[in-house]
Image (cartoon, coloured by chain):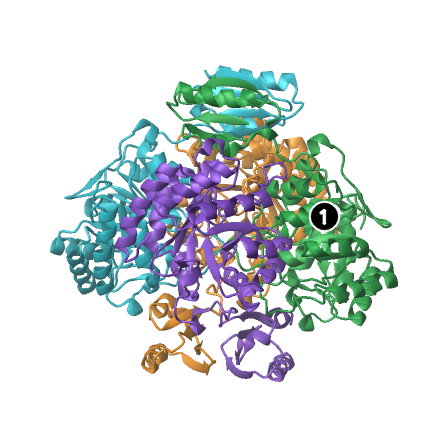
Chain colours: A green, B purple, C cyan, D orange
Amino acid sequence: MIIIMKPNASKESIERIKEDIVEKGLTIHESYGEQYCIIGLVGDTSKIDASQIEANEEVEKIIKVQEPYKKANRLFHPLNSIIQVGNETIGGDKIAVMAGPCSVESEEQIIQLAKDVKKSGAGFLRGGAFKPRTSPYSFQGMGLDGLGLLKKAREATGLPIVTEIMSPYLVEKFVEDVDVIQVGARNMQNFDLLKELGKTKTPILLKRGLSATFEEFLMSAEYIMSEGNENVILCERGIRTFETYTRNTLDLSAVPVLKKLSHLPVVIDPSHAGGLWWLVESLAKAAVAVGADGLMIEVHNNPAKALSDGAQSLKPEKFDSLMKNLSVIAGAVGRSI
Amino acid sequence: MIIIMKPNASKESIERIKEDIVEKGLTIHESYGEQYCIIGLVGDTSKIDASQIEANEEVEKIIKVQEPYKKANRLFHPLNSIIQVGNETIGGDKIAVMAGPCSVESEEQIIQLAKDVKKSGAGFLRGGAFKPRTSPYSFQGMGLDGLGLLKKAREATGLPIVTEIMSPYLVEKFVEDVDVIQVGARNMQNFDLLKELGKTKTPILLKRGLSATFEEFLMSAEYIMSEGNENVILCERGIRTFETYTRNTLDLSAVPVLKKLSHLPVVIDPSHAGGLWWLVESLAKAAVAVGADGLMIEVHNNPAKALSDGAQSLKPEKFDSLMKNLSVIAGAVGRSI
Amino acid sequence: MIIIMKPNASKESIERIKEDIVEKGLTIHESYGEQYCIIGLVGDTSKIDASQIEANEEVEKIIKVQEPYKKANRLFHPLNSIIQVGNETIGGDKIAVMAGPCSVESEEQIIQLAKDVKKSGAGFLRGGAFKPRTSPYSFQGMGLDGLGLLKKAREATGLPIVTEIMSPYLVEKFVEDVDVIQVGARNMQNFDLLKELGKTKTPILLKRGLSATFEEFLMSAEYIMSEGNENVILCERGIRTFETYTRNTLDLSAVPVLKKLSHLPVVIDPSHAGGLWWLVESLAKAAVAVGADGLMIEVHNNPAKALSDGAQSLKPEKFDSLMKNLSVIAGAVGRSI
Amino acid sequence: MIIIMKPNASKESIERIKEDIVEKGLTIHESYGEQYCIIGLVGDTSKIDASQIEANEEVEKIIKVQEPYKKANRLFHPLNSIIQVGNETIGGDKIAVMAGPCSVESEEQIIQLAKDVKKSGAGFLRGGAFKPRTSPYSFQGMGLDGLGLLKKAREATGLPIVTEIMSPYLVEKFVEDVDVIQVGARNMQNFDLLKELGKTKTPILLKRGLSATFEEFLMSAEYIMSEGNENVILCERGIRTFETYTRNTLDLSAVPVLKKLSHLPVVIDPSHAGGLWWLVESLAKAAVAVGADGLMIEVHNNPAKALSDGAQSLKPEKFDSLMKNLSVIAGAVGRSI
């Protein structure tokens, strides 16, 4: 951490800040520029609250040098993390494909779709039982019944299931029933939920918030990891920008950047990012080419009758042809799917 | 709602969509442009899921005409809502000022600050007991102990207290102890929490999410109101933009826009918006001039020792002088403070 | 400037960088943290190209300490700049009001509007002769004829005229005819145009680009000033964000921030920012309260027949009543209008 | 175009608007919802100024149905445009690769780099002679001398040259000397420049502005095309978002979206988008996978000594290996490179 003092900061003020820092067990390197006095802090700055120092009226600004995340940091964990889920892995050479409907709607629907996506090569079944909807008047998911149907679909196909949690009340239930627990973009900074999930061992698929920086995203992973659960999978699903033609703007740079900063696997959700079914195929190809460890894709047997997010769902036949095309791209970047 | 079909959409497709709509009890107006067929829906479109219709490959796009919020909509409730909190009101002629420290830190601190802000004219004491922090390693608030200290400060001064809730587990406790329950920006779309708060009668101060549109913000208010609690206060606290000099970008247009769309009171938080103490005074003045119903301002006796957000806190003396200046502006726009 | 080396950067690499810097006449302060080597540069870093240093594979990142603008920097020019335009000033106690139609449309229109806004208290007449329009098929302004009509309106009223330049070809003509030359948001980084304007002495009203940071905005002012023309007026007119209800998001923090960083006057354009006439009054009041040195307001005698931007224009009667209200706010912040 | 009247709009107001529209030769379809009266316009709405209608106080909002661009619109030109440049094409099966340094720095440099990139398979030489720099104190390019060196490099290798224009004064010179004229992101709405380029026949590579929507981007292409030059190549180079880790956020959805809306070729610039050399390879692969018609890549023999943008430049060896990898991905999507 580096403290830049205001031009003409008083000696007393500089001394007081230095004393505070030394008291906390850190060492100081000072340097004087033409206009500025700069105080460099050496040691474990995680004990220092930047906002406190900035509150000093003679401080110009604070610059952080070290990333504030530890357990998620590749610096202290150089090898890729590979998350084991049943017989499948996420983060290894094989690209993990999680496919299925936005919402579980009926037993017939979810079992048929599970069989379809498995046949096309998906390794995981995704499906929403509890749905975060912008409007209280929209379909909110089948809830616990939906969870029951997902389990039936798992029995029928062997596919591990991925589904979203919205409430800390349900953590125990999800741990029992679900293979990968998804935390949605809107809950990325629901810290109470993150802490509870950190006390489990179940893999967590954490989606990037709509306007979360990479650092904030990794800090949310850190919330889970700091409680003891290191099985975190990061998922980029589009960020909010000025462009409204697409639902969100898929930020594919997230893959190389997050993989540089962190050892955690990174998955892409092209369905939510674009919000338009005809964008899914090309974005999925790009995701594989850019180095993603997995894909999350919405598939629905009848999108025009889907109870949620029909506009971004692929039909099973389209998904099947997409998987064939992705397989070629995966080969071209030295991976399998 | 208006459906715009693709150029060259087939008659069958158009007929099928029309049948679906008529089945749901709505009436249709069709019009044919040079390139597009347009289907207008008349009636209660809240039963229609736009995403379902957009999933049809021959649909170009859907345009919504009516706002999706009902209870928060000024159209159905033309007069301003005035929220009663003890002897104070929010939404009337008098501008409600909520002041106090970011975090409750000790009995002495909070009682002294409560006395200070009361003396300067604040009508509410704000103070965090449960703090949402980006980092799991930062101070997380004093929790239930902090809540207890806030109650002591209320006893000592008579000021109603405003404090943030983070977990649905604590709703009952907060209803008992707190005068205004705050929902933070990060939880604006924590729908499970909103629903539980909707079952209470306690006034809720709902902060706008960092990248929430006005419509999404009002839909979150609608989540609370649709469960029965109509005592919702909207709070603009800065949105996330490309500009990083200020912590967030305060969107003061939010005041006239939200007051046009909705009857709910609108409060401004200039402390979080700018993130810099020296911005608070001028932004607070602008907030009063633009027509805000209230202000939320961080005040700390020793910002450079504050356990959170020191950089944006005013000292009690500065707050006192600010209140005097605000009083003149309030008079200039026909209000009191 | 501070250079942060990668963890495990080689000694050779560090030495090479240090040599390069010393060669350019700067001094070095080094400090070693637990994970990082940090090189601080002391001296005139304007000769150093950060991008060059970042290209070194062992450099983690570069942090700039000093603002890159000199002539626009308040550090070297502590007093407010006051720009003289005829008998009017911009940047002093009196708030400068520039009012008039988006486009000049006819002699009768512009002269009548000039008389109207003068009577209400405006100090400047604004009006577009050359219009930057998103579509090539929209009305592009009356061009040189419009300029001629503006001059007639100036003769008739004595109001100095403010109008936008789009082409470097016309600089000479504008210098001759115009009192304040406006550079629009879209041309904020049209550096060739800025340089040519820098060679004149005419006051330049420079609008902030739609996604320009404060630093980039000041660097564009610096382009003009570094060529010799220090008569630059900054104008905030709304930035582009995710919110689309308003045309742009007016960033009123720009006023205190720009006035802290720079000595140049800051003007607000509430008409373009919101894009909606019913927002203009409340935003203008906020602008005065926040400390703006001036306002730019669109006034049109018949907005529903305006050839451009009718939706954001006030009628002369509304402008007149607005000026009365602004006068009270100006008094409340110790200024006149 | 659809006009939505305010709830309770007066009959007179509705009638007046209808008359205005009918006067302009359009037909009207009216429909009445529960709260709103909706007026649909049929016919050529390009004559209608939406802002004028919105200025009517009883109009709620205007919705545009038809895209405002004609010549760039795929609707009226269903086949892909293929731009011929010497023996190369842009927009066909072969992916066009434009490589070279950010700035031309010396004869030796540019000729050597031209040879290098040609050997690796690039079809075009890019290099800046006139450089738009944020700071007036940064290197501004070699100007006309740089243009001369680019021509020498073309002679030496046969590669057509791509370089940026900043001033309308130089259009004639560029038409004579340059094979593809680049318009930078900062000048995307420099309409005077676009119009002058529209009067030539030289292919124009138009970069998307930092905060330009797809529609605004295509409208800028329309400015060029409406003057007669239909040889426009669109280039996505990253948009400005809240994320600052990368210089900009590369929006790869731009490729499928722009190709759906328009027949023009779409090129990706991964170097400017990320601003970091180690991101270029993975983003370039993703660009090819997503369906881009071309790539623009910065290559420099000694990035740490480059006079501009060193941080994002690849060394020739890296570029060579990148081209080999891209060739495999191109094959996987049925194209060559």
Residue drawn at point x = 63 percent, y = 47 percent:
A191
Residue B281 vs residue A317, the one in the foreground = B281
Residue A162: x and y in percent read: 76, 56
Residue D111: x and y in percent read: 56, 31
| Secondary structure at numbered mark 1 | helix
Residue drawn at point x = 41 percent, y = 40 percent:
C214
Q: Can residue D175 be seen at all in this image of the molecule?
A: no
Residue A153 vs residue D179, the one in the foreground = A153
Quarter of the view holding residue A7: top left
Residue B210 vs residue D266, the one in the foreground = B210
C21 relative position to C263: left or right: right
Mark 1 — residue? A197
Crowding near the residue tagged with mark 1, few <14, some 14–19, many ≥20 C-alpha atoms within 10 Å? many
Q: Is residue C8 above or below residue B92?
A: above
Residue drawn at point x = 46 percent, y = 36 percent:
B311
Q: Report in which chain the residue with disc 1 lies.
A: A
B110 relative position to B319: left or right: right
Residue drawn at point x = 77 percent, y = 52 percent:
A180
Q: Is residue C101 above or below residue C258?
A: below
Residue D163: x and y in percent read: 49, 41
Q: Amino acid at mark 1?
A: Leu
Q: Can residue C141 be seen at all in this image of the molecule?
A: yes
Residue C242: x and y in percent read: 50, 54
Quadrant (top left, top right, bottom left, bottom right) of the N terminus of chain A: top right
